[in-house]
Amino acid sequence: MNHLEVLRDTSPASLTEEFRKKATGCYYTHKSIATQMFEPLLSETEFVEAGRLKVFDPFAGDGRLVIWLIEFCLSNNLPKEWDVYLFDINESGLKEAERSIKRLEDEGVSITYTIKSGDAFKFASMYRDKADLVVTNPPWELLKPDSRELKQLDEDSKNLYISSMKDYDNFLSDNYPVSQPKRKFAGWGTNLSRVGAELSHLLLRNNGYCCIVLPASFFADDQSGRIRKKIISTSDLIELSYYPAEAKLFGKADVASSSLTYKKSDSARRTTKLTIFDKNVEVKSSGDISLEEDNQDEYMIPITLGSESIKVLQKLKRDFPTWEVLEKEKMELWAGRELDETGSKNWLSNEKSGLPFVKGRMVNRFKLDDQEKLYAQKPEYSPPESISHQRIAWRDISRPSQKRRVIATIVPRGAITGNSLGVTFYRNSDETSLLSLLGIINSLCFEFQLRFYLATGHVSLSAIRKVHIPSQKITSKLTELANLCKRKVNGENVSSEKLEAIVARQVYGLNRKEFELIIDSFEKITKEEKQKILLEFEDTSMNKAEISHLIPNHLSSKLSELDMKIVHSVPPGGNWKNIPEDIPSKRIAQIRESYIQGKGSRSTYYGRLRAEMPSYTINTYFNRPGNGCHIHYSQDRVLSQREAARLQSFPDSFEFSGPQTAVNTQIGNAVPPLLSFQIANQIKQSIGSTGVFIDLFSGAGGMGLGFKWAGWQPLLANDIESRFLDTYAKNVHGNTLCGSISDDDFFTTLVQECIKIRARYPSTPFWVLGGPPCQGFSTAGNKRSMDDQRNSLFVHYKKLLEEVSPDGFVFENVAGLLSMEKGKVFERVKSEFSSVMTNLTGWVLNSEDYAIPQRRKRVILVGSKDANFKIFPPAPKTSNNKNDLFSDLKNWITVEESISDLPPISQGENGSHLNYISEPKSDYQRLMRGEISPETYLSYFSN
């Protein structure tokens, strides 16, 4: 660190131990954090079985982390040989580290070691890709001249110190670009903890492990976005832990911290375990969370919340647009600051001359302090247009220790606010909207979201703009909330608990459990206060129908600037061939090259739908323009989740649960319910009645919903994804079991439950739905054993059929199953099933032929124990009459017939709160909106 070397040479007296500690961000790690980081390694086979390990700590201090790691392995009977590399800028700490290593050598541990004193940022990168394991706590300092540091220096030393620090900052920017902030203020902003994370990641070989201590803000702040995304997108996150500032794990440093254990890997998993500790370093909560990348958030993780609270946060984010969208795209709101208070003693007074002036301290919750009267008369100053509006003002200064961090009220027209306040107003000056928004801003639901983005002691506009709030279409209708807020602002005794209840229940649509999780995240709310809020919540009606999800999941993914250029260039029915070559895209260049080489046309890539045709297959990547034909036929965006669900034949009343990526997967993987309905009716005709069923690999419930429509009774659903089962439980049937049937313990539980259920329906046809993947059969040669690990799901599925012994089953799979190894895979699948089912019938069904607006080809196998069982495929309902002039069938259902009544939205917009733009324009739209039943709809296609 150049600037410290300057001090050593020019002002050695100022370089005290306390100064050095502050300037380098050096805080030694508490042993409880180290143990928490090391424990997950015991479940990692590669680590446990390794005989010799290269372990690095580039910011070693006294070497404690590596020493504790070796002792941890010994205590868990994992003797290893160690190549240890310790670097640190503080030579005295390294001497202590060497003494500890020699002690371990004396105790018989096999260790070689390299200890180097100096700045690891300057030399450690020479060990790039060498580490089997990095255990470290990087320095936490923001590289910026601090007045508390500078006051100890004379003028010359001060100038040299700042100049050297700037040179060092430039060095870090050049050599560690991923950890640089998106923007710097006054030329400063490099954070050594972020740079330390980048260096640690560079040191790791592929499949190497990292145990790292970081400020908790690393996982939430906007400035850490690039390095956070780099680590998470190229790693398996094994466990993440959060420690509150109150735990005081770093002495006097009053800061929340985190620890992360991960494995650098090309195949990153999408979940991790999150453990929250309380101030006594005892586990407060622990559970798995999903790592969903948001286009704007770059894998922000709300680590302070815990796994259950994160689900609530995702619900709040899913249902409404962000403040930023309403402000900058929809132009409903204006937000900003008004008058810079610098030098205010020269133009601010108590005399009634100039504009009434409002300072931050004068704003309270729903109240403006009228005891203090100030007036601003600033020379040559033109007041902003905003003062002509009634507006909401909130305090900028907001410390993490406060009970409530959002403090806002109404500021009247004509008054001006200082820059210690943020302000907002509706551009159309609607008072009902403004007052109801005040209630929302002051609510627990709003602050619950906001706290995730607050990395400092300020309520910044950048953080406010990330919070999800209802549009003005909704706030303008919240008359009860607006009236109560108006009365409270006017000084009447209005219950704050009532306001919280209305926002939580009627605006955000939370249930009691969800709202309790939000309340519990505010540690300074007492039990008595919580009880009062919940009593009001129970007394508040769920009057949400007309203001919330008129059309659930009508959300279109946000696209990059490059994607939007591409979207604009593709006409209806067009694809990548229509994209101008001057649009820079490596992927499109690869597609063109592949096409020239005769490796396929990729005709659906970057495709735009045609209004007069069915859609192409809806896959799990319909949120991306480059992964199929997913661009809306007339709007410049990809399909919304609701539009994709409609093309899959899910009605609008079917609401999908989970974050955006999980919902996309549920929709793309589903069996079209309308196709399943027709299959269920064929089985009913063949056996003479409906029956009961269990649904394996159920996903969101496309197959199960179709059978339910046909009069069959669902009894149990199983999937490995809990969010998929949340959707299933909400829309099909509440009895679900989450787990993998390839897990022996879970398999036993599932089989026992199925047998127990079956015993309750001894005389009712009992069927199993669901199709496991069969990729283990798809290998060179035809002697692949059922013992192939990739066939584990299939093996357990077959075993379940043997043990539960249903009357029949329905197996669904992709059409590609038929062509795998020239049909040998399909024949093998049938052969395996024939040993558990006497009768087996197979079809290939095209969804577009069954009055569904989507080209989707699927293999269906229907098995029965009855030797006399005979079944025929459902009769086609529609065809492409342009190609078949003599067909008696009606024409295919088109995209336009399917989705043209849905409200138009922009890319990145959530239109779930919007209403239909017209009455249903087709029978299919009537089906989707619940006006007719599937049976009635299909009757229109009878010959």
Image (cartoon, rainbow, N blue to C red):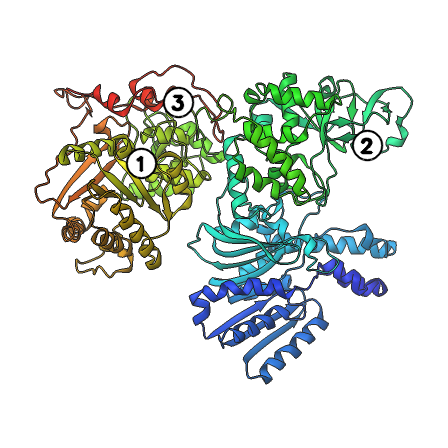
Q: Secondary structure at mark 3?
A: loop
Using residue 737 as the reference point, say whether residue 597 is left or right of it. Answer: left
Mark nearest the camera among 1 and 2 is 1
Pick whichever of labels 3 and 1 is earlier in the sequence: 3
The residue at the point 76 percent across, 63 percent down is 5
What's the CA distance linking mark 2 and mark 3?
49 Å
Mark 1: amino acid = Gly
What's the CA distance linking mark 1 and mark 2?
60 Å
Mark nearest the camera among 3 and 1 is 1
Q: Nearer the viewer, residue 439 or 177?
A: 439
In the rendering, which numbered label is found on residue 702? 1
Q: Residue furthest left?
A: 868
Q: Provide the residue designation for mark 3.
A: 634
Pick whichever of labels 1 and 2 is earlier in the sequence: 2
Q: Relative to 588, does residue 785 appear above or below in the rendering?
A: below
Q: Relative to 329, does residue 77 appear above or below in the rendering?
A: below
Image quarter hosting the N terminus: bottom right
In the rendering, which numbered label is found on residue 603? none
Mark 3: amino acid = Ser
The residue at the point 84 percent across, 57 percent down is 157
Mark 2: amino acid = Glu
The residue at the point 81 percent across, 50 percent down is 147
Q: Nearer the viewer, residue 419 or 409?
A: 409
Q: Provide the residue designation for mark 2.
A: 341
Mark nearest the camera among 2 and 3 is 2
Q: Secondary structure at mark 1?
A: helix
**Mark 1 closeness class: few <14, some 14–19, many ≥20 residues within 10 Å:** many
